[in-house]
Amino acid sequence: MKSRVNWPKTLAYYAVVIFSALFVYGAVFPVRVPDRFSASFSAERVAEDVKVVDRIGRSGAGDSRNILREYLYYRLKQMGGTTSRLRYDSLLSFDGKTKKINISDVYSVFTPGMVGDSAKTGYVVLVARIDSGYGASVILELVKQALRYREYWHGGIKVLFIGGLGGNYLHGMRSAMYDGDLIFKNANLVFDIASAGRTGPVMLLGTSEGNSSVIRLFQENVRRACAYSAAGRLYERIFPESEFSLLRDSLPALLFSPIGNLRQYYNYGSDITDPPLKTLQSYGIQIDPVIHAYLTSGGYSAVNSFKSDSDSIYFSFPGLGMYVTGKRGYFIISILTYIVFIISLLYYIQAGKVKINNVLRYCMYSAFFCFGAFVSGTAVSFFSSLLCGERYSFLKLSDLGCYSVIMVILLAILFFWILIFYRFREKKSEKLVCYNFLFGTLLFIIPAGIVVRIIMGEDIFLLIPLLASAATLFLGIFKNLRFFYLVAAGIVSVVGFSVVTCIYIILSFGASGIVLMISSMYMLLLIAQYYCFKRDFL
């Protein structure tokens, strides 16, 4: 069988892939930053406060944190909040040894404008570290926006800036939790506004146990959500002990943070002369509409309105909203994927389009590519770090521009390596290589996803592409539905670009092996679908 390129179909297929990439990276719907005079959430105003907080931190004064505490205290007081300083002395350290740790928090309450304060009034609590330039500044802007419609509030706002130094932030949060009759009384929903990274998109990085109600609120009100439950699980493993770890077990809570350059998590006074406006604006995109919905809707004002016994698994599609399902729905989708795969495989075997031994062979090829990508990526990141004068670290390599260039080159090499390999197989006149290729890839990724599910608790970022690819093979049986190859290419591309980018940003260049291994799975699906699409339409 002499292979030839069908250029119109090839261009159409890869145009879908390229458009999906542009869609994911914001080229289609870019983040727009309102100017500082805008009535809406403005990153320009937030950036001004970030610079002030950072300037105080770099002042060199021995009492710089006290100065910052007073600055935030008077800012909240000027806004009309009932503001106080909470001091905790001689706290017991987490290692069980008595250690004198003195911590001061700043606490402020904004009571509802419509119904007034009462024992039945629910509050949203905004929490950040007192010296977090991003977190503290974002909270000030969020409160400012909420006060514009205070007469319509059905609930109230509480603000808590946690004091501490280094690991003592845990002591500050723990003390606030023990003082719950004051701070967290009638707390319906807590927002932990962190700055685990300094750049990149702001993501919903964590939720409390029993998150179905809060995720429903988030899904219904955030049009450009950036949220992946799998990313939250990954974050928990990177930062097992944080302020949010104390919150999520006792209160309905959401954690937001940029995910770029996590190694700067504990930096204070790090000379932020030019805060990334798009990152700061992302806080407003993710959080501001949720606060507005909570405060202005009477359905959320009752105490304990977000208590739930069920958890949701979620995945956001850039610009398209969120896919949310419960554990039962997740189980049904998994079973449906496996059934569609098995039915399609049996049909293609019966029709003589695939042979099981060829499918198994291509399954082994897929495993080879994934393993090779992991080994190669790890080796390149190791030697690159040495050449750049750094000690290799899986999570804490610097955010050097050369690392990103190397990663792009590695991804390009991996893609063309897979493409050329299967092009070579096709040229050797191997009959119906495309179907064997796609079935073999699916047969490898299905058990790989199960392993990921055992380790991470879910594999939704693999399950969605698997279902799309299996459905493509099934619908390809019917001549009029073969256009679904293009739809599946879009789904796999959007999920793939989103997941790979997030994993790389969160884990850094040191985890290149993991990034390339996961990338190879999406590339295998895309290239296999391309060959099937090209053949079915010739």
Image (tube, rainbow, N blue to C red):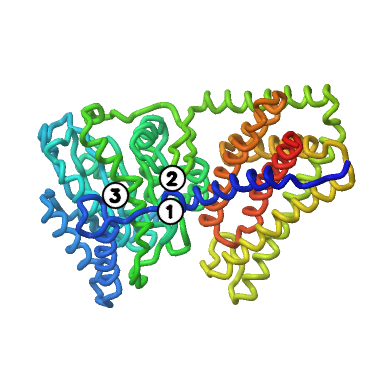
Q: Earlier in the sequence, mark 3 or mark 1?
A: 3
Residue hosting label 3: 127
The Cα–Cα distance between marks 2 and 1, rounded to whole angstroms, is 8 Å
Residue hosting label 2: 226
Could you tell me if the residues under marks 2 and 1 are in contact, i.e. CB atoms within 8 Å?
yes
Q: Which mark is residue 258?
A: none
Front residue of this view, candidates 493 and 459? 493
Residue 450 lies, in percent from the top left, at 65, 35
Q: Considering the numbered disc 1 on the image, is that residue within a helix, a strand or a loop?
A: strand
Residue 316 lies, in percent from the top left, at 47, 40
* Residue at horizontal 48 percent and vertical 29 percent from the top: 325
* Residue at horizontal 68 percent and vertical 24 percent from the top: 340
The Cα–Cα distance between marks 3 and 1, rounded to whole angstroms, is 20 Å
Q: Considering the numbered disc 2 on the image, is that residue within a helix, a strand or a loop?
A: loop
Could you tell me if the residues under marks 2 and 3 are in contact, i.e. CB atoms within 8 Å?
no
The three-letter amino acid code for the residue at tag 2 is Cys
The three-letter amino acid code for the residue at tag 1 is Pro
* Location of residue 379 (image quadrant): bottom right
Quick check: 483 above or below 72? above
Q: Quadrant of the N terminus?
A: top right
The three-letter amino acid code for the residue at tag 3 is Val
Q: Is residue 213 left or right of 262 when viewed as pictured?
A: left
Q: Which mark is residue 201?
A: 1
Front residue of this view, candidates 90 and 57? 57
Residue 418 lies, in percent from the top left, at 75, 51
Q: Earlier in the sequence, mark 2 or mark 3?
A: 3
Front residue of this view, candidates 217 and 498? 498
The Cα–Cα distance between marks 2 and 3, rounded to whole angstroms, is 20 Å
* Pair 2/3: label in front: 2
